[in-house]
Image (cartoon, rainbow, N blue to C red):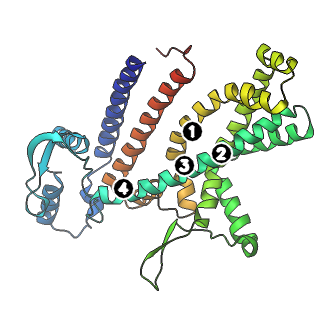
Amino acid sequence: MFRLLAKRTLQGIGVIWGIISLLFFIFYFLGDPIAYMVDDQTDESTQLAIKEKYGLNQPIHLQYLQYLNGISPIGFQTITGKENAHNRLGAFSIKAPDFGRSFQSNQKINELLVPRLKGTLILALSAIVFAGFFGILLGLFAALYQDTLIDRSILSASLLGISAPSFFTGVLIAWIFAIYLHDWTNFNITGYLWEYDPLTGNSILIPKNLILPALTLGIRPLAVFIQLTRSSVLEILMADYVRTAKAKGLNRFTVLFKHILQNALNPVLSSITGWLASLLAGAFFIEYIFNWHGIGKLTIDALNTNDFPVILACSITIGTIFVIVNIITDFLYAILDPRIRIH
């Protein structure tokens, strides 16, 4: 088991390094970043000062090595001189990853990224809880009432949920619940979980702003969990031990919860962890539509302003989370079903 974890961890580190390298060189060859930071009237001395400030006057291989050292949790401490110039390396130690500064705002990217990552995690976790609970419940109903109107209705709705694009679903849900039915729902089209109160000057919690984006983001995994639960339960219903339990006269609820769900939910629970990583990466359009302050909206805003360091940091963060969650998923598969051998 631990060999599997070690193997997957080493593979994950290699994948993350590949993601970082690919994105870094893609952005480097897109053009001179200085062109996006200054206008045509800026004199050459100012441009040279900006290049020195951000380390853009160094050869590409040195920029790459310094960037790797900066974002690595284990590396040389960076000692910053006056006005962020003349950076030099300190002691080798465990440190917090540093993505540098934004080209547009000159703000530390870590300060931009951490609160936005928190927003995306809240949204993704809420969506996966919603999808997991109702997906298992509806999938169970569909299996128990196989080939009935209930089963066909649930399956039709799940197929629609899988096929509908997320951006279309987001716009449709916002229009229905936040505009057309606003007098009954009182939902806002846009908003974050915490909003600034101009009267008190403090942030106030508004839970209702989470409902529509979480519902939109959870529709596709909900549809998948319905079908996965239904197939798994139908397979377990045909097993010999279930027939034996029924023949012994056990009541329906005992058979359902002790013999069916306990075995049928293993693939569903494993799928939930995998979908969590997908939701983190797939929340971009949802966050933009509902103006949710997450890492997806931060990335889109950075794309609009050509803020390459922010785009790079967001992409690397999402890719790293995706790899970590997939490692955990592989490990859970091995725990839940020891027959599985991942090579």
Q: Is residue 63 left or right of residue 277?
A: left
Q: Residues within 10 Å of mark 3 (few under 14, many from 20)?
A: some
Residue at which label 2 appears: 131
Q: Is residue 28 left or right of residue 128?
A: left
Callout 2: SS: helix
How far apart are the two marked residues, 1 and 2, measured between alpha carbons? Answer: 10 Å
Looking at the image, is mark 4 or mark 3 earlier in the sequence? 4
Residue at which label 4 appears: 113
How far apart are the two marked residues, 3 and 1, measured between alpha carbons? Answer: 10 Å
Q: Quadrant of residue 176?
A: bottom right
Q: Is residue 220 left or right of residue 91?
A: right
Q: Residue at left 86%, top 42%?
A: 153
Q: Is residue 299 visible?
A: no
Q: Quadrant of residue 102?
A: bottom left
Residue at which label 1 appears: 275
How far apart are the two marked residues, 2 and 3, measured between alpha carbons? Answer: 10 Å
Q: Tell me the kind of residue under disc 3.
A: Leu
Q: Is residue 318 left or right of residue 125?
A: left
Looking at the image, is mark 1 or mark 2 earlier in the sequence? 2
Q: Residues within 10 Å of mark 2 (few under 14, many from 20)?
A: many
Residue at which label 3 appears: 125
Q: Is residue 74 visible?
A: yes
User: Is residue 330 depicted above or below 274 in this figure?
Assistant: above
